[in-house]
Image (cartoon, rainbow, N blue to C red):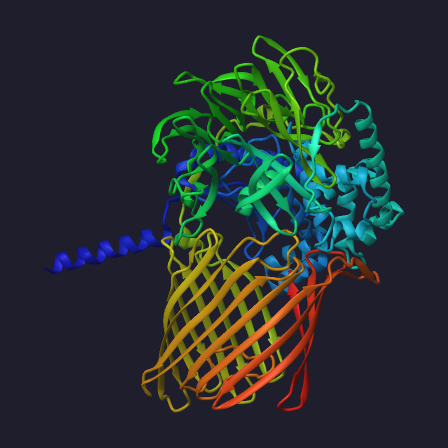
Amino acid sequence: MKRVYWQFIILGLLLLNHAAWGQEWRVIDQESFRLIYPADVEDEAQRIAARLNTYVEAHVQALPVERGLRKIDVVLRTNEHTSNGFVGVFPYRTVWYNRPAPFAGLEWMDVLAVHEGRHIVQMNQANDSPWLRLLSTVLGPDIGMGVSLLIMPDWYFEGDATVSETTHTLGGRGRVASFDLWYRTDILNQPSYDYDRTMIGTGFERYPYLGPYVLGYYLTGYLRMNYGDDLFEQVHHRIGQWDGGTFDQEIERLTGQPIEVHFAELTAQLKQRWQQQRDAHPTTSVTSWRDPATDRWVSHYPLGMANGTLWTLRVDMNTGYQAGRWHDGKWEAVVDIPVDVARHYYSGAKTRAISVDDEALCWVREQPDVVRPHHSYGDIQCWSADEGYHWVTQQQKFTHVAHHPDGFVAHELDAQRRSAIVWLDTQGQETRRHTLPVGSLAFDLSANDLGVVYVLAGADSLDGLYHVRGTAEPVRLMPSAQEVIRAPQLTEHGLLFTSDRTGRDQLYWHTLDDPAQVQTRRPYGAYYPILAEDGNRVWFADYQSTGQQLAWIDLPLTGVNPAWVEADTDRPERYVEPLMRPINHAATAPVDEPETEKYRPWQHLWNPTQWSISTDFRQVTAQVLSQDVLDHLTLELFAGYDFTEPAPLGGLTADYRLAAGPVLSVGAEQGADTRQLRVTGSLPMQWTNATAEPYVGMVQQWSDDDTPEQRIGTGFDLALGRDRPMQAIRPQRAYSGTHQAEYHLAARQWSFASASTVTLSGWQPTQALEVQWATQWLQQDTPLLDDHPVFGAATAQELTQQNNLTYLFNSGAQGGALGSWVFLRNTEFGVSAHHQYQQDNHRAAFGVSASPSLVLLRQNALRIAPKAAVYYEPGEQAFSAQLSLNLAL
């Protein structure tokens, strides 16, 4: 029996170990980084390590780091099915996610290696600064890196990395026409915003967004080409010295002109350049329709034909994202589309994400694992009039989907980075598959009785447009060479697609028996072509400065059609062409693969990121914060001394998240006259539009006389809501709530509290209504509800009820500089009414508030929102005022 007993203990420990660490990890340890990756992507990890080494070496040559690079952990999150990557601090690391995006004309991990590799070197410039090194010594190793992010404007941080994509590779966003589409079109048709309005913004511009990538690409490239490729290395060196100035000040000192003048000159240069490119080729005519409901930026993207009706996606900055039917010049909204699906259309990727047939609209949507952290999926979701929203698949790794006569055809990229085209029946069950090169992406799939056509990217020399008929092997119809091909459709008459080979995305067509191509010439770009059911007419999105207009032309099936011209062969020079030095990876490939070893997460749990010592002359405390790079353990320790008692102080808080999802929290604290022990277990959960976290815990506290006091508690947090339109100040509908209960064991008394907030859209997108209500039953000294802004702490025993009603409205764009240090984006005002019932006593109050959104030092990372509020209580005939400050780093 004893042997069986120990076997159960060993089995339990093994299961706990698996729950704690999950998958097996390995590491490739290099001079400037440690690549931490799942063991099942060994070959990919070797390739990624080689590419990152090459790019980092090239970046260091351009931005020398005198004291060398601080080694960084690079974490491959291949189970996370999202298109992103970042370099961050607290802890200092870079995290790369798995799902590819076709916006840069490169294999996905190659994009991350060159772009995030540039960020690594940028941030390490902090190592050469004496005062940043001092901060790192005093406050922790990651503090200097964090401050460097506040010193560099985001347009430089992201723009310089985007330039590097284009100059160090044969791809990069600088070679993709849709990358600067909004900026280019706006400059040619609208009065230009000044530097502050463009780079910082107000949140209410006339276009959806530009962001630091586009603007920074051009401004960084302009400065490097006009003032030397080493300009920013000099700027980094200067701002790191004791007598150095801000980033903008050093630009002015080194170039002789303020950044505003450079931006104005760049804008004039780009306008002239783009005007000449547009005028070099006469525009072909089309018939178009603009949404008559508004004069602001609104776009219509053709989705497909169903039952003789054209479906389009409408993207409106104020009202959001809806699919609807267009017929005879009228559009009817039918269903809301998730923002993460709609983003494929209005972002620079411009991929076709929604498929339409006579029964349903379908798309691939990222879906998080409900409990496991860092796991997500790409599943097929559909909407139909009969079933509403419904999932066709669960826990798959799809990226794109299209309807097929027998069901669906989709592209899959799994956690091992294996790529395939998959055919599924109408229930989402796989019927067959075709394997593609590892890490490659097939997108813009289209299927009919002639077979499936798709675009393959990330496969190097195999990139191009493919056709699969029946069970035959795919046939490449054309290669993709220095161009982005999208939206192919194959008919019995010919092939229709879009390409940006001439510097603007245009429609292209050629018949099956004649490879000679013809194209449209639209001034800014033509996207998302859809063939009418008769096969003669093409619907497409025709971009203008006020958004994508719905347009249509007839195919050149017979005779001459003036809407189509002979395809151009000229390729325009890229803006940063003088800076281009593409890397030959074949020449720089390592002779031998680097050694790998098993990565043991438990050996790296202790990873201090910052520390501090503080005093108010009554107490002195030292604090250390630690966070491991795999997000398992967050640790906070402090120790000190209270001179007024006198007595030692100390404490520890540890939050540990198992790979299976639960979070175990332990806290111990020694105060001047009390000791406390806390143990809590919780389970964070997430869905596509909701989060929840139930928890249970125990607190034991001892006072001076060592009398123990024990409390147990439970509760849950819940938040859910709809997507927020781009320029709405709040989601159209949202709920958040905290509900908790505590039981005092010695007194045998219960206390509970519930606080909820419902947010609704107002009469205008710049307005919103917040309704709050809270209830507390208290049988202890410490209240469970947060302090009320008017009524204070709810310390009264037994029942307390609070209700708040707040109407918020925003000023909209203000965009004014308040001196040289502060930029005013917009101001949010509020009018509120408050009520509290407590111990048979009713209190009421009314308030007004104002909260300007301010940016300091022209750094978007330094955004603050001070709030001033005045309240009046009629029963007390008294006024009160409050000031608060929200710092959003």
The residue that appears at 76% across and 26% down in the rendered structure is 573
The residue that appears at 73% across and 43% down in the rendered structure is 216
Is residue 335 shown above or below 354?
below
Image quadrant containing the C terminus: bottom right
Where is residue 498 drawn, in percent x and y?
A: 63, 25
Image quadrant containing the N terminus: bottom left
Q: Is residue 241 left or right of residue 597?
A: right
- Tell me where residue 740 sits by quadrant: bottom left
Is residue 760 shown above or below 270?
below
The residue that appears at 18% across and 58% down in the rendered structure is 6
Note whether residue 167 is visible: no
Where is residue 711 drawn, in percent x and y?
A: 36, 80
Where is residue 232 drawn, in percent x and y?
A: 76, 44
Q: Is residue 745 left or right of residue 647?
A: left
Foreground of the two, 634 or 803: 803
Where is residue 169 drawn, in percent x and y?
A: 64, 30
Is residue 323 shown above or below 423?
below
Foreground of the two, 621 or 844: 844
The residue that appears at 57% across and 66% down in the rendered structure is 611
Note whether residue 135 is visible: yes
